[in-house]
Image (spheres, rainbow, N blue to C red):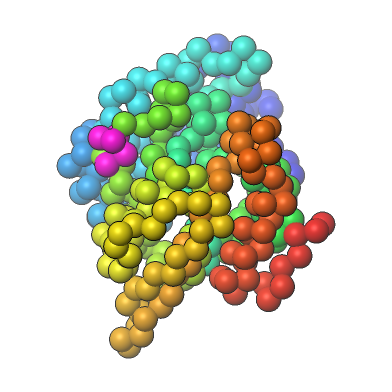
Amino acid sequence: MTGPDPATGPAADAADGATGPIPPGSGWPDDPATPSTPIAGDAAQVRDLAASAGTLRELAARQSVCRACPRLVEWREQVASVKRRSLRAERYWGRPVPGWGSEQPRVLILGLAPAAHGGNRTGRIFTGDRSGDVLFASLYRCGLAAAPESTAAGDGQRLIGTRMAAAVRCAPPLNKPSVVERDTCAPWLSAELDLVTAWLRVIVCLGGFAWQALWPALRSVGIAVPRPRPPFGHGAEVSVTFPGGAGAQERVLVIGCYHPSQQNTFTGRVTPGMLDEIFERSSRAAGLAAEPDCSR
């Protein structure tokens, strides 16, 4: 994989003293927004802009410039300006992190929120942090990613029949968004689901927060969800249906997976083998591989 040109990319900007957030349309690799992308400033505007986006590209652009949650805006931009000591030579994205990957995904991977020095730095969810290192290695082994690492936007990584998104698009303090912030951000997820349900067959929820955020989003796009809501657990599976063409009922399998956080991987609560089992199952259920082999 090749990364951004060090002479013109984020590291060069940082060396010149620049700090985040990155202005939309200023040349950051894979930035979906332009200076004219409309910006949501409150929950009502999030709902309106999410519902009217029309395409995944435009939806991602609008997600990436949202300013509806003052606490999250202040935090993500503060992190992008102060930076971590070991990363001071880099420019931080410092904006909401949009969904990315296949535009016709068979598998959707849903996380909690970008990491302060991961996605908030790179502009891509689960990229540039240790959680992402473990996650992408497993996706690569199971044939859902083109490379075993995801280090930066523009690094050549590609998801295969798969899309990634976060329930909350901004990095939150202590990795804990508030209920109001979760609900304000929810229309972005609903709109993304609405644009991909024609192809979607599996949703993998990384952690209990993503699991809980998914059910109202599914209901908002016409997918029947069970009552009461099923409990989260690693390997938990729930089959839901939504209306297909000509009156058909399509099936989507929702799978729970422990989040590959440092705490979980360091303590052995989730292992590479456990992730491989989840993504083998996902690939098979999505019809991406009859018998995926995660042993490579």
Where residue 212 appears, x then y in whole percent? Answer: 37, 49
| The C terminus - image quarter | bottom right
Give the tally of numbered discs. 0
Which of the pair 262/117 is nearer the observer?
A: 262
Which of the pair 184/7 is nearer the observer?
A: 184
Q: Which residues are magenta?
A: 179-183
Q: Is residue 68 magenta?
A: no
Residue displayed at 28% across by 49% down: 187
Is 189 on the left or on the right of 270, as rendered? left
Where residue 273 appears, x then y in whole percent? Answer: 72, 51
Tell me which corner region of the image, top left, top right, bottom left or bottom right, holds residue 129.
top right
Residue displayed at 36% across by 36% down: 65
> Is residue 251 visible to us here?
yes
| The N terminus - image quarter | top right
Relative height, residue 110 to residue 66 (above, below) = below
Is 121 on the left or on the right of 70, as rendered? right
Is 278 on the left or on the right of 209, as rendered? right
Which of the pair 223/7 is nearer the observer?
A: 223
Where residue 8 appears, x then y in whole percent? Answer: 63, 27
Relative height, residue 222 to residue 99 (above, below) = below
Q: Residue furthest left?
A: 44
Where residue 241 appears, x then y in whole percent? Answer: 37, 73
Residue displayed at 51% across by 58% down: 236
> Is residue 102 visible to us here?
no
The secondary structure that most of the magenta stretch takes on is helix
Q: Residue furthest bottom?
A: 246
